[in-house]
């Protein structure tokens, strides 16, 4: 990939640069109307910048922006190097290592920076990956490729389906573990979706992301990827999980169960937490030691994967808050939803002002479920009058299932059955470890 | 980007006649020592091509940058470094002069002059470390060395002087190696395991390394005998330089070199055996490291590199200043390659409006400022100039604005001469915060304590940084005496000196005054004492 010749420049500046035969990477001398002289390499301009400045990288490494209005003369005095990325040689093959497939869906979990221009190139192929994260080739035999390239906020049920099918293919091809790199914002929704879509897994499937992009020294990209590949290749488990930093140090990568994990911080490297449960496995980056929690489904290559990758988007997750407009419930019903998950307060409550609109919806046999917006803990609607009233109306409490998992499960369940009764029954049946009747104190 | 920080940096640029950029681009400068939690420091060029006149000579100011301060290192162990993060992210203005300062003394003067301009913005915080000098020193045939963390102005010329001396010393060593016909390529990356030889030594370091499953590795340094112990600057030898490198790259505790042995529990038989194992000749030296195998090898690799450099040149380095002006190796000198764009901060356009606003509000330069203080507050030229050069100018203005009935010249004297004399008495006056200074003068202004008490209050506060001025007044018993208490004291003094009063009548005033003042000095207004005493004496006369 090369950077476009005059990337980011528009209008007058672009014309002027073209006229002077300047390209990104050219060495430019600008003489201002007051006689000042600036020399440096022409740098690409960011997409949303104005059209009146030229950016130069000076010899000492600093970038400066000079207004075209102030410029008297613009000359190209040398052709610097264009930003380029040499293709790394393929990694050495280690015999006897587990085969791990890496499926990339977006985000730049591994990328390289051209330090002269600041251009970032994602590492996409197995060879690229190995050159950026050389540790990988000692851990597993990597088969890497891009499924698609999306920011995670753009990922939805169609992508989940695509990912599930891709995983099935990789497993059929003999992968002993699958790693999916994914933007972190909705990583936990995808993890829940794949947990339901990939039943009877013979090998582990681990989603991985980076809270800090790999162009920052504080990046967790390489360490998370290393941990995910190691756990996917070596850990004796067979389920969908999310592998990320345990704490702030580059020490332990933990795997969380796909249905019980949530992003709980905007930027910390340990943003992902197991909710109402404990992590299922951990990988020590220094020693390579893997530790497992008891009771996790084990690998079994003879197990036959059952793919159920359809989701029905006609399902709503509605968060209650003081001042909630009760009309929202009615609009959800008229929009043709097949079910609603309410994210209630505390033990599972919404204001009594909603009772009428809920009653109407429930009368039409629309399944309505309750999860809690407190994130941690279990709903219990038998404690207060409001809870009892809601139970009486026919709202179904979802035990200790987290709201994000609940909506994903509802989309999945709605695609499996047409019956409202069946939807209610399936929502309360644990399918991928998403709920338990007993929450341990150390899990909360 | 913090708009106020940018304004201060632009103001500073204007005062230094530097031309502001049209658009500011923030860069990430990679720092690998851990002092910045993100792994990079954000920095941006604000202005270029300024100048400052020092002793009639125009010194170019190449660049003014706005950066964020890093964490402060407060300690370290073998495997970790401890940082305080209280300064992390604080805006920092870096002013770089051109490479034109020719002698150490001039360097000090330029630093002082830049400091004066900084103070003129009144945005510079008081206290050690708020203005720091990084020095770039190079000599003919030497190398560009960056010295970090020179906190005191007085050290600038000293540090520069030492650095020149160090580079000359290194060049002498290089020449001597050349005479001995030692080339860089003669120094081989070949390490010999001498664990068996040194296992019997009494060295604590060796013992503890071996206890932890470590090894002792040795490296031959052909032709280095006698050069490792050569002192370049006080307490810094070529061996020290090598050791610091090994510590940095190999995370080892340190190294032993042949010029300092036998010592540290390693006796001459060990030295001989190690030399034999390495195949050392008459002029050869060696270094040994005791640590785990990986770290020991990394440490010795660093020593190889330093030895090769010794045979060729003075290596470019970033060095840290010691309190005595000597320096130690900190890290390699980074180049332009460690800088790349900070994509989280959009470029900032500096509009003409902003420049005009700042231009109109440009603070006065130190000389003008002093003149202004003279007229506005009737200060002597000397006092005004001292105030401008002190860290207390912002505090002065604040105090004078509040404590209306205290003479500005009195405040200025306390803030300059008196505080300095307290400092000479080893009173930690830097502990006294601005708000505490203000409190003290406010109490005088409100008549709650005498102005003679201010210095005692400040002395108390220096030792009680968490206290308040009011508390100091109370603890030191410096409250003003009430009128009725004062009358009682006067009565008592008059009564116990009946004879004197009887004999001299009102003429006893002077002597009685002394006696009363001895009891209430600092707690009563002498004018009031005189008045009351007069009335009392007249009463006796009647």
Image (cartoon, coloured by chain):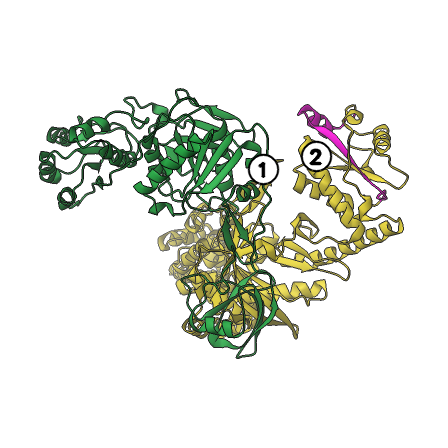
Q: Does the magenta stretch include residue B205?
A: yes
Q: Which mark is residue B326?
A: none
The image position of residue A287, as x and y in percent, is 56, 29
B85 relative to A39 in the view: left or right: left
| Quadrant for the N terminus of chain B in the image | bottom left
A123 relative to A412 in the view: left or right: right
Element class at badge 1:
loop
Q: Name the residue under label 1.
A: B80
**Spatial distance from mark 2 to mark 1, Cα to Cα?**
17 Å
Q: Is residue A121 above or below residue B417?
A: above
Q: Which mark is residue B296?
A: 2
Q: In this view, does A118 lie above or below A406?
A: below
At horizontal 16% and vertical 30% (from top left) the residue drawn is A419
Q: Between residue B72 and residue A436, name the one nearer to us.
A: A436
Q: The yellow chain is which one?
A: B
Tell me whether marks 2 and 1 sit on the same chain: yes
The range drawn in magenta is B201-226
- Badge nearest the viewer, 2 or 1: 2
The image position of residue B34, as x and y in percent, is 56, 44
At horizontal 24% and vertical 35% (from top left) the residue drawn is A415
The image position of residue B353, as x and y in percent, is 41, 73
The hue in which chain A appears in the rendered picture of the protein: green
Q: Is residue B475 magenta?
A: no
């Amino acid at each position: 990939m090369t950077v476009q010749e005059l990337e980011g420049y528009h209008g007058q500046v672009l014309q002027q640069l073209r006229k002077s035969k300047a390209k990104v990477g050219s060495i430019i001398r600008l003489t201002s109307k007051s006689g000042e002289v600036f020399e440096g390499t022409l740098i690409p301009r960011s997409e949303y910048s104005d059209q009146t400045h030229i950016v130069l990288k000076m010899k000492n490494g600093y970038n400066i922006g000079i207004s075209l209005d102030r410029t008297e003369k613009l000359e190209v005095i040398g052709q610097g190097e264009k930003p380029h990325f040499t293709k790394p040689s393929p990694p050495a093959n280690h015999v006897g290592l587990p085969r791990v497939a890496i499926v990339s869906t977006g985000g730049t979990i591994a990328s390289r920076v051209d330090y002269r221009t600041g251009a970032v190139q994602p590492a996409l192929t197995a060879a690229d990956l190995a050159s950026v994260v050389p540790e990988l080739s000692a851990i597993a035999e990597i088969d890497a490729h891009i499924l698609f390239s999306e920011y995670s906020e753009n990922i939805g049920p169609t992508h989940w389906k695509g990912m599930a099918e891709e995983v099935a293919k990789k497993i059929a091809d003999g992968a002993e573990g699958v790693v999916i790199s994914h933007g972190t914002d909705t990583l936990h929704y995808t993890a829940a979706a794949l947990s339901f879509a990939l039943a009877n897994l013979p090998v582990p499937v681990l989603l991985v992301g980076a809270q800090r992009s790999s162009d920052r020294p504080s990046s967790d990209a390489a360490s998370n990827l290393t941990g995910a590949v190691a756990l996917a290749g070596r850990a004796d488990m067979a389920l969908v999980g999310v592998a990320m930093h345990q704490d702030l140090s580059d020490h332990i990568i933990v795997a969380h169960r796909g249905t019980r994990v949530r992003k709980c911080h905007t930027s910390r490297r340990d943003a992902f937490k197991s909710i109402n449960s404990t992590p299922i496995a951990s990988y020590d980056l220094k020693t390579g030691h893997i530790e497992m929690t008891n009771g996790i489904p084990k690998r079994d290559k003879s197990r036959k994967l059952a793919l159920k990758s359809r989701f029905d988007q006609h399902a709503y997750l509605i968060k209650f808050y003081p001042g909630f407009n009760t009309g929202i419930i009615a609009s959800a019903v008229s929009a043709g939803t097949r079910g609603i998950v309410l994210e209630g307060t505390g033990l599972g409550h919404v204001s009594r002002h909603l009772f009428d609109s809920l009653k109407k919806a429930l009368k039409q046999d629309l399944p309505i479920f309750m999860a809690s917006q407190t994130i941690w803990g279990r709903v219990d609607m038998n404690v207060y009058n409001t809870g009892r009233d809601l139970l009486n109306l026919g709202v179904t409490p979802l035990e200790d299932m987290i709201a994000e998992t609940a909506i994903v499960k509802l989309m999945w369940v709605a695609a499996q059955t047409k019956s409202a009764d069946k939807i209610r029954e399936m929502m309360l049946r644990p399918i991928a470890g998403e709920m338990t009747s007993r929450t341990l104190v150390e899990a909360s | 980007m913090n708009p106020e920080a940018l304004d201060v940096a632009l103001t500073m640029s204007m005062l230094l006649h530097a031309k502001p950029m049209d658009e500011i681009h923030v860069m990430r400068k990679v720092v690998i020592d851990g002092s910045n939690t993100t792994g990079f420091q954000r920095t941006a060029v604000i202005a270029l091509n300024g100048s400052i006149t020092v002793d009639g000579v125009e010194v170019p100011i190449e660049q003014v940058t706005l950066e964020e301060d890093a964490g402060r290192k407060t300690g370290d162990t073998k495997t970790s470094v401890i940082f305080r993060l209280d300064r992390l992210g604080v805006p920092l203005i870096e002013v770089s002069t051109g490479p034109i300062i020719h002698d150490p003394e001039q360097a000090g003067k330029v630093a002082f002059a830049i400091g004066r301009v900084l103070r003129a913005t009144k945005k510079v915080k008081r206290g050690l470390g708020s203005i720091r000098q990084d020095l770039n020193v190079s000599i003919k045939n030497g190398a560009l060395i960056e010295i970090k963390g020179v906190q005191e102005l007085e050290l600038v010329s000293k540090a520069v002087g030492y650095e020149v001396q160090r580079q000359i010393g290194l060049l002498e060593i290089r020449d001597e190696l050349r005479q001995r016909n030692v080339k860089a390529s003669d120094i081989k990356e070949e390490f010999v395991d001498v664990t068996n030889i040194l296992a019997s030594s009494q060295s604590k370091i060796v013992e503890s390394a071996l206890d932890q499953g470590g090894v002792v590795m040795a490296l031959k340094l052909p032709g280095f005998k006698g050069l490792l112990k050569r002192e370049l600057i006080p307490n810094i030898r070529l061996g020290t330089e090598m050791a610091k490198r090994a510590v940095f790259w190999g995370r080892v505790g340190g190294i032993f070199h042949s010029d300092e042995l036998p010592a540290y529990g390693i006796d001459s038989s060990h030295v001989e055996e190690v030399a034999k194992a390495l195949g050392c000749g008459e002029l050869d030296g060696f270094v040994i490291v005791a640590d785990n195998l990986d770290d020991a090898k990394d440490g010795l690799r660093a020593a190889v590199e330093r030895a090769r450099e010794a045979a060729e040149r003075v290596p470019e380095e970033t060095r840290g200043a010691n309190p005595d002006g000597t320096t130690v190796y900190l890290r390699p000198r980074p180049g332009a390659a460690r800088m790349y764009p900070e994509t989280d901060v959009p470029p900032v356009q500096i509009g003409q409006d902003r420049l005009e606003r700042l231009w109109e509000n440009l603070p006065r330069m130190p000389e003008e400022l002093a003149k202004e203080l003279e007229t506005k507050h009737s200060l002597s030229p000397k006092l005004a100039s001292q105030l401008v050069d002190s860290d207390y100018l912002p505090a002065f203005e604040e105090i004078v604005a509040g404590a209306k009935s205290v003479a500005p010249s009195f405040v200025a004297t306390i803030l300059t001469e008196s505080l300095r004399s307290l400092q000479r008495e080893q009173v930690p006056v830097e502990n006294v915060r601005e708000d505490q200074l203000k409190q003290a003068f406010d109490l005088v202004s409100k008549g709650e304590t005498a102005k003679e008490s201010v210095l005692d209050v400040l002395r108390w506060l220096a030792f009680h940084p968490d206290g308040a001025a009011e508390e100091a007044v109370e603890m030191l018993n410096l409250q003003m005496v009430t009128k009725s208490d004062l009358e009682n004291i006067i009565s008592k003094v008059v009564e116990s000196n009946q004879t004197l009063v009887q004999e001299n009548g009102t003429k006893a005033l002077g002597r009685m005054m002394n006696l009363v003042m001895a009891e209430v000095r600092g707690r009563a207004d002498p004018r009031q004492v005189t008045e009351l005493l007069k009335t009392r004496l007249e009463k006796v006369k009647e």
